Amino acid sequence: MKFVTSLGAGTALWLFAALNVASAQDLNVLCGVDEDWCLTMETAFEAKTGLEVAMERKSTGEILDRIRGERADPVIDVWWGGTGDTHLQGAAEGLMEPYQPAHSEDALPWAQNFFQMSGGKASGVYAGALGFAYNADILEDMDVPTPSCWKDLTDPQYRGLVQMANPKSSGTAFTVLATLIQLLGEDEAFAYLSALARNIPSFTTSGAAPVKAAARGETGIGISFIHDAVTQKLAGAPLVIVAPCEGTGYEIGAVSIVSGARNLDNARRFVDFAMSPDGQATGAASGQNQIPSNARAALPPAAPDISLIRMVDYDFATFGSPEQRRRLLDRFDKEVLQGASAVETQ
Ligand code: PLP
């Protein structure tokens, strides 16, 4: 009290405000899902707990790079959302903290398997299949055929009309790369991607950007997760959504706690919420269409029925390995990006 009096009223007020801001930093989260979902989740968790969350949206590969960069002195406590094989890569690099969240008994079998595979360091929150969507108005105006298979997308008639993200930054695009390898074999997949790159004017940073661009009529065809395309279509975009005829891959979106997190208790509370029916309901509440991992969580009404889609038996063990990630991204850079002299844009 004496200390405050001797500083004077104005300084005391300033000091009080400064202390308040410092103590408001209860949890730092990097969010890998759509911006709208990040915001809805942040608001719901803050309302439930009274904690203050600093949440930032980034693409999956960018999050992995950021957490790697902070290994010696982590600022980020939780990585929520984004494709599971990249969480597995982080776990295998020793970047994630083991935690068995509340509600794990209600996790669907694919989420239970994923948790085991991560060594108890990442929990599956949602699932969704990969595909593409085309803008029917654009393709009709350009008088080009409509695609239904991966192989159609390399047709020179689509020169400049296809968008896909860069797998270094985007978990969606890394899933494309891993899916094509599982469908075609590695050498054929890279030959396919080199041919596809001739139709792609630029690789985006974010995985949902291609389908959002197709929705706005800025490109003809966007390769993304099908649930992202559903969200755009429900908003009124003239999109036709395609589950490719050869079959496709899928993601298990995940949540992990960063090893050495400063706000460990709050991080655990966040992960518990992310795995709860209420936490998972924030997806549908923000217009998302992934399949929740908690059997008690409501399925968004427009979520694609993945049992109707021809799906590869996705090899999370192989594609969740840091060595494979490094090797495949290096090969993508040399053979696809440099080969096509493609320009990366946001
Ligand atoms: N947005 C949605 C809706 C997703 O399901 C995912 C994957 O988990 C992402 C974004 C991932 O974004 P990015 O490909 O930019 O890493």
Image: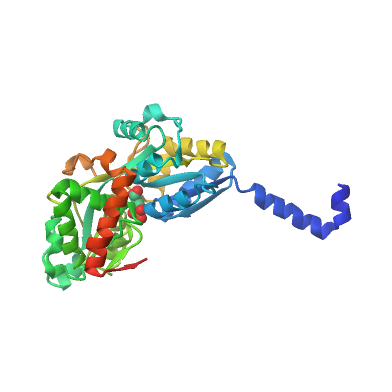
Residue 117 visible? The answer is yes
Q: Position of residue 167 (x, y in %)?
A: 30, 56
Q: Residue at x 45, y 49 (%)?
A: 68
- Seen in the picture, residue 310 relative to 144 is either above or below; the reply is above
State left or right for residue 328 relative to residue 70. left
Q: Nearer the viewer, residue 200 or 242?
A: 200
Q: Residue at x 40, y 42 (%)?
A: 93
In the image: residue 1, left or right of residue 193: right
Q: How is the image coloured?
A: rainbow
Residue 33: x percent and y percent? 39, 51
Taking the view exactly as shown, the residue that stands out farthest to the top is 105
Q: Residue furthest bottom?
A: 142
Who is closer to the viewer here, 332 or 14? Answer: 332
Q: Is residue 225 visible?
A: no
Expressed as whole percent of the image width and height from the top left, the position of residue 228 reads 30, 53
21 left or right, relative to 101: right
Count of numbered badges drawn on the protein: 0
Snapshot quadrant of residue 58: bottom left
> Which image quarter is the C terminus in?
bottom left
- Which of 183 and 241 lies nearest the eye of the viewer? 183
Res. 162 image quadrant? bottom left
8 left or right of 333 in image = right
* Residue 310 x %, y %: 16, 43
